Amino acid sequence: MLKGINPLLNADVLQALRAMGHGDDLIIADTNFPADSVARLTVLGRLLRIDAPAADVVKAVLSLYPLDTFVDDAAARMEIVGKPDEIPAVQQEVQSEIDAAEGKAWPMISVERYAFYERAKKAYCVIQTGERRFYGCFAFRKGVVPPDAE
C-alpha cells in the first residue's frame, strides 16, 4: 500500500500508466472483451487486470492519468450493437467518474464494436476489469502533465 494511491492500482498497472506517453491509448475492458488476445497485440504485449467494477477502475486510473485535451476522442465507449445512442448503466457510471475526475462534463464518444477492437489492438495496454455487465469497455487517450503540476 502507498499513501495517496488508490489500492486498486497494482504495481503492473502503475508501471504501465507511468510508461505511457502523450497520445497513447489505454483500454479498460469488461470480462467478456477478448482482452488476452487483444492485449498480446498492444505495445505492452500482455494483459493487466484489476478485478473490480468498471467505474471503480476508471476512478482509480483517472486519479493519476491525465486525459488528452488536444483531441475529441480522449474518452470513448464501445457502442451497443444496433443501438449506438443507448447508454447503459455501466457507461453512465463511468461517465460520472470521468466528469468528476476532470471537474467538468467530458462526454465520451461512441465507437462501433469492431472499430473499438481495432483501436484496442493499437493501444499501449489493456486492463481487464471484473465488470460483468455488457458494454463495459472504454478507451482513454493519455494527455500531458504540465510542468507546474504536483
Image (cartoon, rainbow, N blue to C red):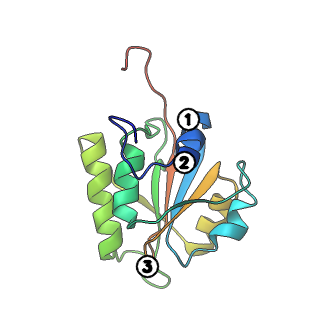
Q: Are marks 3 and 1 in contact (CB under 8 Å)?
A: no
Residue at 59% across, 66% down: 116
Q: Going by the picture, which residue comes out furthest to the front?
A: 1
Q: Which mark is residue 13?
A: 2
C-alpha separation, residue under disc 3 versus residue under disc 1: 27 Å
Residue 134: x %, y % from top left: 44, 80
Residue 80, position in %: x, y? 45, 79
Quarter of the rendering containing residue 101: top left
- The amino acid type found where label 2 is placed reads Val
The residue under the point 42% across, 82% down is 83
Residue 117: percent from the left, percent from the top? 64, 67
Gap between marks 1 and 2 measured at Cα: 9 Å
Q: Which amino acid does label 3 sit on?
A: Arg
Q: In this view, does 123 lie to the left or right of 29?
A: right
Secondary structure beneath dot 2 equals: helix
| Horizontal arrangement in the rendering, residue 34 relative to residue 7 (left or right) | right
Residue wearing tag 3: 132
Three-letter amino acid code at the position of disc 1: Arg
Tell me the quarter of the picture where residue 48 sits.
bottom right
33, above or below 138, in the image: below
> Does the image show residue 105?
no
Residue bearing the label numbered 1: 18
Task: Please indicate, yes or no, whether residue 113 appears anywhere in the rendered image.
Answer: yes
Mark 2 Cα within 10 Å, few/some/many (few <14, many 20+)?
some
Task: Name which of mark 1 and mark 2 comes first in the sequence.
Answer: 2
